[in-house]
Image (cartoon, grey):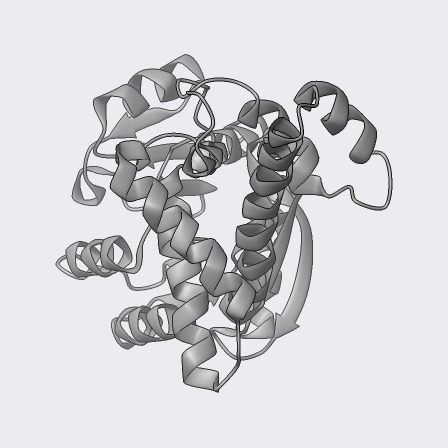
Amino acid sequence: MSDPSVVFVGIGAIGLPMATQLVSAGYTVTGVDPLPAAHGRAGAAGVRAVTRFSEAPKAESVVVMVATPAQLDDLVTEALAADVTGQRWIVMSTVGPESVREQAARLESAGAAVIDVPVTGGVARARTGELTLFASGPAADIEAARPILERFGTVHKVGAALGDGQAIKVVNQHLCSVHIVAAAEALALASALGLDREKVLSLVERGAAGSWMLSDRGPRMLQGTDVDVTSTINIFVKDSGLVSEAARAAGAQTPLLDVAQARYLQAADAGLSTRDDSRVIETYGLPQ
């Protein structure tokens, strides 16, 4: 396969702008997503889309941006029903170390090469090709995939073992999980103190109390339930759960993460699962 072809699995809020980065670089990209709405957005962005992996043409590389370990397992099971010999699989989902190792072993036994490259930076940086990539796996495979990876952002080689990238992403998601809830709690406190939350946000984000999550999620927290979705509550239910599982396996204490996780679960129980993750602020009793 000499054509620089890519199958991109998961063309959602962050996956589609990543796929379009490849299209703009001259790659032949086929997106895979079960949601009809995703197909419409992909078509408008110049990305051909299909519903199932088995419907996509065999490609040189497969980029994976599914949401959960279960989805990764289903994808690999479907892929192994056909021939994956010689393919390079780039797993960029946040699924945890154990999941990526398990699925990589299945793919490698069938003749595919696998690297573990989770990303951070959100939708805004996916659109500009400025994500941060945590790449782990055989050095030669990472280098072979570099032309694709560098379309997404800055590549950091973090280890030779598959799962090392996921482990770093676990630490990253610990902080993201806590920082979003901390931002929500602080803005809820501002409201309880009778302050103008917009003014408070504009002041504190410029100083020592500022954080990327406060500046990114804070403005959306000041809007209503129907704010545009860039990452769902469900994603942080999943991610905080992955952090919790990894921490328990390592014997690490994560009391702040445990508090944050409880807030995401509370938000999900309140019917906010598919709302933007900024809506965790509603667990503090603020008007919707």
**Front-lying residue, 197 or 232:** 197
Residue projecting furthest to the left: 81
Rendering coords of residue 144 (x, y %): 57, 60
Rendering coords of residue 10 (x, y %): 35, 40
Q: Is residue 43 above or below residue 146?
A: above
Residue 206, image quadrant = top right
Instruction: Left or right? Give the position of 167 relative to 239.
Output: right
How many numbered discs? 0
Instruction: Left or right? Give the position of 146 relative to 239.
Output: right
Rendering coords of residue 288 (x, y %): 41, 20
The residue shown at (30%, 42%) is: 268
**Front-lying residue, 17 or 239:** 239
The residue shown at (46%, 19%) is: 227
Q: Is residue 137 above or below residue 194?
A: below
Q: Is residue 41 above or below residue 54?
A: above
Rendering coords of residue 207 (x, y %): 87, 39
